[in-house]
Amino acid sequence: MRKNIVAGNWKMNKTLQEGVALATELKEKLASAKPNCDVIIGTPFIHLATVSELLEGSIIKVSAENCADKESGAYTGEVSAAMVKSTGAEYCIIGHSERRSYYGETFEILKEKVLLALKNGLKPIFCIGEKKEERESGKQNDVVKAQLEGSLFNLSAEEFSNIVLAYEPVWAIGTGLTATSDQAEDMHAYIRSLIAGKYGNEVAENTTILYGGSCNPKNAAELFSKPDVDGGLIGGASLKADDFKAIIDAFN
Ligand code: 13P
């Protein structure tokens, strides 16, 4: 059966020292109370090696927030999937709406990133989700379907089984406006039906689909109670160890 996961996405927050302090605090909190789900923290590139080392032997896994769409070479400022893997990170967030909208990441670019992440032994946490206008005009299903088809459905079933999906409606990210648990469930069930159509029921049932967008200690239990919501990708609330732990505890 698929895993339940609570993953943090620190985005562009925390200096190295602050990140180390947060990871240390979280490690200590989770050592005494074993969680009922997998726990991942997604950190900026500069934290990865230090935080991975610090978390060795802990149940917390580490993720990058991005990787390059090229293998190696003259791409100043970029960080390759192989480099991410060499830090000890096991996951890589790909296709976050902030990358799509602020950095022009297209379906094609994201497709390359996914392939390179997989080739280098990283598990992509692939983000999809519609914008406010798209939901208001009832296009959310079409948008999400195009995102899956445009960047993931080229994969074989075996490759796809390494993907974690995160449904993050753009209108809910950092806005305090959470999707209702019914809205989340409707979309997650739809996403799972698309996976079943492409790869069959077994792959669909084994795919973890996270919800992201203003998920917090107050609403996490309700969201996670839905059958197709397998956990969360947490932004703001992952920056405080107590809040992140409280969201993890929603699985208890
Ligand atoms: P918030 O939890 O801050 O809304 O961010 C969600 C997100 O973008 C996680 O990737």
Image (cartoon, rainbow, N blue to C red):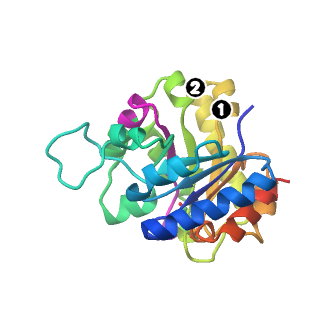
In this picture, residue 61 sits left or right of residue 146: right
Question: Is 99 or 79 nearer to us in this picture?
Answer: 79
- Residue 63 can be seen in this image: yes
Give the SS element for disc 2.
Answer: helix
Give the SS element for disc 1.
Answer: helix
Please give the name of the residue rendered at 81% of the width and 54% of the height, measured from the top-left corner. 33
Question: Which dot marks residue 199?
Answer: 2
Disc 1 C-beta below 8 A from ligand 1: no
Highlighted range, magenta: 115-134
In this picture, residue 86 sits left or right of residue 52: left
Quadrant containing ligand 1: bottom right
Please give the name of the residue rendered at 22% of the width and 56% of the height, measured from the top-left corner. 77
At label 2, the amino acid type is: Tyr
Image quadrant in which the N terminus is located:
top right
Disc 2 to disc 1, C-alpha distance: 7 Å
Q: How many numbered markers are drawn? A: 2
In this picture, residue 83 sits left or right of residue 226: left
Circles 2 and 1: CB distance less than 8 Å? yes
At label 1, the amino acid type is: Ala
Q: Where does the image place residue 21, in percent across and percent down from the top left?
A: 56, 67
Q: Let me know if residue 55 is in the magenta part.
A: no
Please give the name of the residue rendered at 77% of the width and 72% of the height, measured from the top-left corner. 218
Question: Is 25 or 227 nearer to us in this picture?
Answer: 25
Question: Which dot marks residue 204?
Answer: 1
Depicted 136 relative to depicted 130: above or below: below
Q: Where does the image place residue 237, in percent across and percent down from the top left?
A: 63, 70
Q: Which is nearer the N-term, disc 2 or disc 1?
A: 2
Question: Which dot marks residue 39?
Answer: none
Q: Where does the image place residue 81, in percent across and percent down from the top left?
A: 36, 40
In this picture, residue 199 sits left or right of residue 216: left
